[in-house]
Image: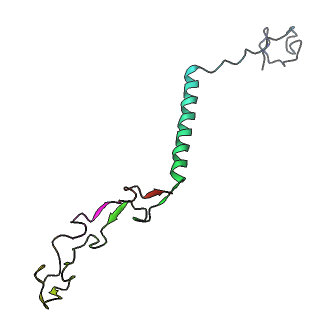
Amino acid sequence: MPKCPECNANVGKSDAACKSCGAELGELAPPPPPRPPSSASQYGIIIGVIVVVAALLIFISGAMGSKKCPECKGKGTWICVVCKGQTPKCVTCKGSGSDPQTFSTCATCGGKGTAQVCYNCKGTWKKACPKCGGSGTVNE
């Protein structure tokens, strides 16, 4: 609110004279024009817009054209279907401990029914899914 130059009282914008002291106010000077934004704030706005646009692009590209990998069910890892990470069964006797052809103790496992290493995964029972490369998603 404008002030009277004589008594420093509040006056209206359209008042011709001060109501307190009666001093003529004349025409008040218009307020100064707003300052343009500094280059630092302009750079801040530009960088903020770029970050928001990049985040939106990443979000949209992740949501479009990809679905859960059917091979690993979206987990990104492949577990051996033969041993499932457990002690593997003997290939010859299939875990029974006896040879089905000779009806005697299995010579491969010595009657234990287990093998040292799984024949399918060679001991690396958990690895990145070969279909999705470990991401858990595949493109349509």
Percent position of residue 126, x then y: 29, 63
Residue 102 sits inside the magenta stretch: no
Could you say which is closer to the camera, residue 79 or residue 130?
Answer: 130
Q: Quadrant of the N terminus?
A: top right
The span shown in magenta is 117-129
Q: Above or below — where is 90 with respect to 75? A: below
Is 10 displayed left or right of 43 in the figure? right
Q: Residue drawn at (79%, 14%), measured in percent from left and top?
A: 30
Q: Above or below — where is 100 with respect to 72? A: below
Q: Which of the 4 image quarters holds residue 41?
A: top right
Could you say which is closer to the camera, residue 123 or residue 8?
Answer: 123
Residue 127 sits inside the magenta stretch: yes
Is 6 displayed left or right of 134 in the figure? right
Q: Which of the 4 image quarters holds residue 86?
A: bottom left
Residue found at the far bottom of this picture: 103
Could you say which is closer to the camera, residue 96 or residue 43?
Answer: 96
Q: Residue drawn at (50%, 51%), measured in percent from left and top?
A: 62
Tell me which secondary structure the magenta stretch mostly adopts: loop
Q: How many marks?
A: 0
Residue found at the far front of this picture: 101
Q: Residue drawn at (40%, 65%), measured in percent from left and top?
A: 71
Percent position of residue 23, x then y: 86, 8
Percent position of residue 34, x then y: 70, 19
Could you say which is closer to the camera, residue 32 or residue 14?
Answer: 32
Q: How is the image coloured?
A: rainbow
Q: Above or below — where is 123 with respect to 92? A: above
Percent position of residue 139, x then y: 48, 55
Q: Above or below — where is 8 with respect to 76? A: above
